[in-house]
């Protein structure tokens, strides 16, 4: 029997998850002519999954200023004159993905991510999403000109919440249906094909029938038991940066009907996060608990020792793995330390009211106020570090400047400045987990693959639930882009639009 209001021959698509990936999937399915229902486990005020907690930065390939202007056409002549957007080629994007994942990422999926990134952002703009240059976080003004670095240039207007609100508005205005407080707990099958979703809502369990289902319900980072099972001992102590609803339901449902688990199940995106942040994300603070300006200072543990190369690369290529390094330290805590020479370069997140911060006129006073730290070793560490800085190399925050240290067991490769100009600032951080890398195997049409290597009819996946894209590390801004690119592919495929397109090209 057809659903109410369903046109003859119109497919029914159910999308599970109301974040960026799910919304892009739902919009694409509507474009493909389907009747689309989106299930959001959260109540409406908490909608949006992890996307609502991000800063909204999106990595994409572009050739130069002209491409940026296509996405941000209202840039003024003054802004254009004082900005060097540079370029970020498809080859650079692909190479960055390969390099930071130690060449384990699926080349076919990454090729889609890279080659469709710019076009997908244009499509999102057509849907009502607005983008802005990331001044301040991704470009510093040197000699009167902003220069963008690290392959990351634009963010959604309003950050993650603005992105989510824009996509929800587009979906609902196009006729999509949203059911809040509906947690998907199972998939139904009919004749070997996925035929619906079992949901729990308002204390009741019911089944919503569908011709296709798209899983866009995130990773399992909010599930402390799964974190400890798959990521390892100690991960129960990590703070969850985003939503409390990403507990692995999609993984479990799909694997229950034979889906293949895939990717880096012992890996995740984890960052330096304020040590006193709550257990789950705070929507009022959003991404403000992150602390990502460490390349301009040093990071020490409670023993008073440095343990990572803070200047190994642009923060875009190290921040997603350094949270795990903090988790390994005694008490799962570390301190980021800066002096007045670089304090003006610190990102806005260092100025929020909820920050765990110490300011002092001397290093001796600073360390006395840093709870639980070995003061004697800290002062020795700073002294050794200061003596090792090569001050003959000019400091330049816009490039990997090669201003490093020599003779230290843990080097600092770039942006090394002596800590000798008061006042001094210290920020207490712990590990904040963003999302897990292990998930389901999909093909280039976003179809979920089963343990025999065949697609499961009627089942698609996109977003953080997809395995095989990220391993060990992550280039900043690539997660939202991957969600959008594969969300769009999944929605089109689920609605049958990809099949119709393929059929028309063959007949032509």
Image: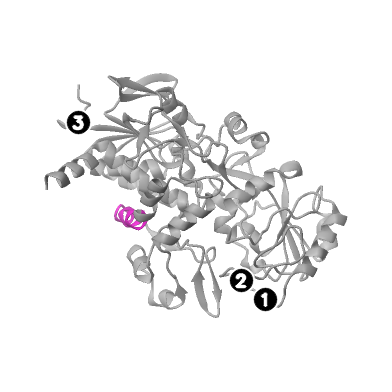
**What crowding class fits label 2: few (fewer than 14 Cα within 10 Å), some (14-19), or many (20 or more)?**
some
Q: Is residue 132 above or below residue 261?
A: below
Please state if 429 lies on the left or on the right of 214 as rendered: right
Q: Is residue 108 above or below residue 401?
A: above
Q: Quadrant of residue 305?
A: bottom right
Q: Secondary structure at mark 2?
A: loop
Q: Position of residue 192 (x, y in %)?
A: 30, 21
**What crowding class fits label 3: few (fewer than 14 Cα within 10 Å), some (14-19), or many (20 or more)?**
few
- Calculate the distance from the C-alpha at mark 1 to the C-alpha at mark 3: 68 Å
Tell me the mark number nearer the camera, choosing from 1 and 3: 1
Please state the extent of the stretch shown in magenta in the rendering. 117-128
Q: Observer-nearest residue: 308 or 227?
A: 308
Q: What label does residue 308 carry, if any?
A: none
Tell me the mark number nearer the camera, choosing from 3 and 2: 2
Residue 122 colored in magenta in the image: yes
- Residue sitting at 32 percent across and 25 percent down? 196
Q: Which residue is mark 2?
A: 401
Q: Which residue is mark 1?
A: 393
Determine whether label 1 and label 2 are within 8 Å by CB.
Answer: yes
Q: Secondary structure at mark 1?
A: loop
Is residue 155 visible in the rendered image? The answer is no
Q: Which residue is mark 3?
A: 6
The secondary structure that dominates the magenta segment is helix
Is residue 124 visible in the rendered image? The answer is yes
Q: Residue furthest right?
A: 376
Determine whether label 1 and label 3 are within 8 Å by CB.
Answer: no
Dot placed on the residue nearer the N-terminal end, 1 or 3: 3
Dot placed on the residue nearer the N-terminal end, 1 or 2: 1
């Amino acid at each position: 029997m057809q659903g109410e209001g369903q046109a003859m021959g119109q497919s029914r698509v159910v999308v599970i998850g109301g974040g960026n990936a799910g919304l892009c999937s739902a919009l694409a399915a509507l474009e493909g002519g389907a009747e689309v229902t989106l299930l959001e486990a959260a109540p409406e005020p908490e909608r949006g999954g992890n996307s609502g907690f991000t800063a909204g930065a999106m990595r994409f390939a572009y050739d130069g200023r002209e491409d940026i202007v296509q996405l941000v056409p209202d840039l003024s002549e003054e802004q254009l004159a004082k900005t060097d957007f540079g370029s970020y080629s498809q080859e650079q994007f692909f190479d960055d993905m390969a390099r930071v994942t130690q060449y384990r990422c699926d080349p076919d999926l990454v090729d889609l991510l890279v080659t469709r990134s710019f076009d997908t952002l244009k499509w999102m703009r057509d849907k009502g999403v607005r983008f802005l240059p990331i001044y301040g976080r991704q470009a510093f003004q040197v000699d009167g000109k902003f220069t963008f670095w690290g392959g990351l240039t634009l963010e959604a207007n309003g950050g993650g919440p603005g992105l989510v609100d824009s996509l929800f508005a587009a979906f609902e205005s196009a006729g999509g249906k949203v059911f809040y407080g509906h947690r998907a707990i199972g998939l139904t099958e009919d004749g070997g094909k996925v035929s619906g979703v079992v949901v729990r809502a308002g204390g009741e369990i019911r089944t919503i029938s569908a011709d296709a289902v798209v899983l866009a319900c995130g990773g399992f980072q909010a599930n402390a038991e799964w974190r400890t099972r798959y990521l390892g001992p100690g991960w129960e102590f990590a703070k969850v940066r985003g939503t409390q609803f990403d507990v692995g339901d999609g993984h479990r449902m799909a694997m229950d009907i034979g889906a293949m688990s895939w990717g880096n199940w012992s890996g995740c995106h984890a960052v330096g996060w304020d040590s006193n942040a709550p257990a789950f994300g705070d929507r009022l603070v959003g991404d403000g608990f992150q602390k990502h300006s460490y390349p301009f200072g040093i990071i020490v543990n409670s023993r008073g020792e440095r343990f990572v190369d803070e200047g190994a690369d642009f923060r875009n290529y190290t921040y997603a793995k350094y949270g795990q390094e903090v988790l390994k330290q005694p008490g799962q805590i570390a301190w980021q330390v800066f002096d007045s020479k670089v304090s003006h370069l610190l990102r806005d997140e260092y100025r929020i009211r909820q920050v765990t911060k110490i300011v002092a006129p001397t290093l001796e006073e600073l360390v006395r106020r840093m709870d639980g730290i070995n003061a004697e070793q800290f002062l020795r560490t700073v002294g050794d570090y200061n003596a090792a800085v090569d001050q003959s190399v000019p400091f330049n925050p816009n490039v990997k400047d090669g201003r490093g240290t020599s003779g230290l067991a843990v080097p600092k490769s770039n942006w090394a400045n002596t800590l000798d100009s008061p006042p001094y600032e210290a920020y207490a951080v712990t590990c904040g987990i963003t999302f897990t890398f292990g998930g389901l195997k999909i093909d280039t049409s976003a179809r979920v693959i089963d343990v025999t290597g065949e697609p499961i009819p009627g089942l698609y996946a996109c977003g953080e639930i997809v395995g095989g894209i990220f391993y060990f590390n992550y280039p900043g801004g690539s997660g939202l882009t991957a969600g959008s690119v594969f969300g769009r592919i999944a929605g089109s495929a689920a609605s049958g639009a990809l099949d119709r397109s393929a059929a028309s090209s063959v007949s032509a």
